[in-house]
Image (spheres, rainbow, N blue to C red):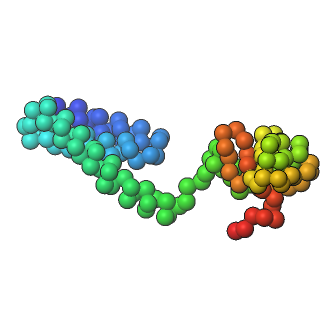
């Protein structure tokens, strides 16, 4: 009857995976199913747990990267939060140099600095976010950005 606990655990992990979409819990669910199989074959609880752990790790290491590559090739992941700001344009609201300044980026004012030493971006100029360092947008002139 211990196989039912393993199957129940696999189902719970599978449902939670639907919320996270990280594919890690799905791999653990596969391990739980392997534990259920071991229980069904009469293995003791220690062997069941070892089988579940080994299969889970094997799935995370071997199957998950392949699944993620396939998923990303079918639909590119949309960047969110800070990484989504890279490449966007902003308007300088306080002169930006390599020492600091401020830009308006997607309706919010950010601390900013120039990506090049000695380059100053005047108020009102349009800049592109080259990268984010902490809470500071490192910017460059729009015309210097090459696709």
Residue that extends furthest to the left in the rendered view of this protein: 42
- The answer to whether residue 46 shows anywhere in this view is yes
Q: Identify whether 6 is placed above or below 95.
A: above
Viewer-side residue, 60 vs 1: 60
Instruction: Give me the residue at 91% from left, 51% from top.
Output: 122
Instruction: Give me the residue at 80% from left, 42% from top.
Output: 100
- The answer to whether residue 105 shows anywhere in this view is no
Residue 1 shown left or right of residue 122 in the figure: left
Q: Identify whether 47 is placed above or below 123.
A: above
Instruction: Give me the residue at 37% from left, 53% from top.
Output: 64
The quarter holding residue 4 reads: top left
Instruction: Please provide percent x and percent y for residue 75.
Output: 53, 61
Position of the N terminus by quadrant: top left
Position of the C terminus by quadrant: bottom right
Residue 125 shown left or right of residue 7 in the figure: right
Residue that extends furthest to the front in the rendered view of this protein: 118
Residue that extends furthest to the bottom in the rendered view of this protein: 147
Instruction: Please provide percent x and percent y for residue 35.
Output: 19, 39
Instruction: Give me the residue at 19% from left, 35% from top.
Output: 49
Instruction: Please provide percent x and percent y for residue 114.
Output: 78, 50
Residue 107 shown left or right of residue 29 in the figure: right
Instruction: Please provide percent x and percent y for residue 48.
Output: 16, 36
Viewer-side residue, 108 vs 20: 108
Q: How many numbered callouts?
A: 0
């Amino acid at each position: 009857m211990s196989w039912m606990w393993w199957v129940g655990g696999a189902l719970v992990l599978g449902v939670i995976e639907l919320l996270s979409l990280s594919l890690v819990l799905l791999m653990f669910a596969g391990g739980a199913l392997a534990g259920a199989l071991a229980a069904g074959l009469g293995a003791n609880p220690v062997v069941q747990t070892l089988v579940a752990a080994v299969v889970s790790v094997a799935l995370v290491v071997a199957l998950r990267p392949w699944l993620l590559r396939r998923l990303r090739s079918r639909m590119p992941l949309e960047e969110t939060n800070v990484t989504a700001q890279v490449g966007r344009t902003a308007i300088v609201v306080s002169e930006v140099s390599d020492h600091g300044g401020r830009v308006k980026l997607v309706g919010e004012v950010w601390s900013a600095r120039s990506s090049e030493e000695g380059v100053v971006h005047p108020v009102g100029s349009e800049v592109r976010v080259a990268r984010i360092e902490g809470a500071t947008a490192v910017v460059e002139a729009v015309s210097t950005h090459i696709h």
